[in-house]
Image (spheres, grey):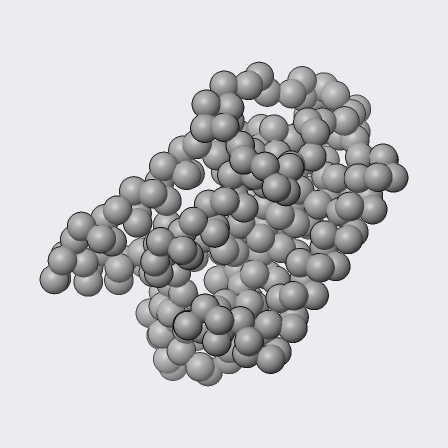
Amino acid sequence: MSAQPDPSQDDRQGPPPPRFGGREPAFNLPPGTLWLTLAVLAGFALQNILEGPAWTSFMSALAFVSPVFWPPGSDLPSLTALPSLVTYAFLHADFMHLALNLGFFLAFGSFVERHLGLIRYLLLFALTAAAGALAEFWFRGAEPVALIGASGAVYGMTGAAMRFMFASGQPGQRRRALAFVGVFMGLNLVFGISGLGDFLAGAQVGWKAHAGGFIAGAVLSYLLARRRSGLHGPA
């Protein structure tokens, strides 16, 4: 397992940017990324092992379902459903859904955790997952939403990674970050508006959750990094 970066370093310094085409060796994963990956795999395993009422109870407990989260006619969300803003991220529709999310998560999550440290990284994961669910819920309006998948948090890690790359002060990294953001969000916009993404995936894709997670990741990573630098050294 690799060493964590010195927290007293300037926020502009950090680990090298993620390799978009490479793979992160499992033995080199920082602890938070490893734990979350194992939790996602465990959730997917239980989805495929459980049957009947046990499966229904498991999915109902973890999935984000908007009428359960905010019951019709209620002025406030259900307190018992608040954990589903995060727990839905540990469920996936099928193996391809799981593989795509974990592939991006391993690359970008490891990079972000080495910048933020374990606790702030886990907090960022939870907050960006929640931001993705809330964005999908808000923009769907009265339409019921049932949401599963780690995409909101994965896009949150991507937004955070791009923010760190842009803050590095290196022109090459800034250009790559801007290009990646343009392509990444442009494709989401095209697929979301045209419906092409839903057609290719064979299911309704939470594009609004992707955008919400990405924006939250970029903003929150800035705030969390400032907090860490303020506690331990110069910003």
Query: In the displayed structure, would residue 228 be above or below residue 203?
Result: above
Query: In the displayed structure, would residue 16 be above or below residue 216?
Result: above
Between 104 and 90, the one lying in front of the other is: 104
Between 219 and 59, the one lying in front of the other is: 59
Q: Quadrant of the C terminus?
A: top right
Using residue 157 as the reference point, say whether residue 31 is left or right of it. left
Using residue 184 as the reference point, say whether residue 73 is left or right of it. left
Q: Position of residue 61 (x, y in %)?
A: 27, 57
Q: Residue furthest front?
A: 21
The residue lying at 47 percent from left, 52 percent from top is: 100
The residue lying at 78 percent from left, 51 percent from top is: 178
Q: Position of residue 97 (x, y in %)?
A: 42, 56
Between 223 and 91, the one lying in front of the other is: 91
Using residue 90 as the reference point, say whether residue 29 is left or right of it. right
> Which quadrant would residue 3 be assigned to in this image?
top right
| Residue 19 visible, this angle | yes
Q: Position of residue 176 (x, y in %)?
A: 78, 46
Between 235 and 157, the one lying in front of the other is: 157
Q: How many marks?
A: 0
Q: Position of residue 233 (x, y in %)?
A: 74, 21
The residue lying at 46 percent from left, 82 percent from top is: 142
The residue lying at 34 percent from left, 43 percent from top is: 41
| Residue 136 visible, this angle | no
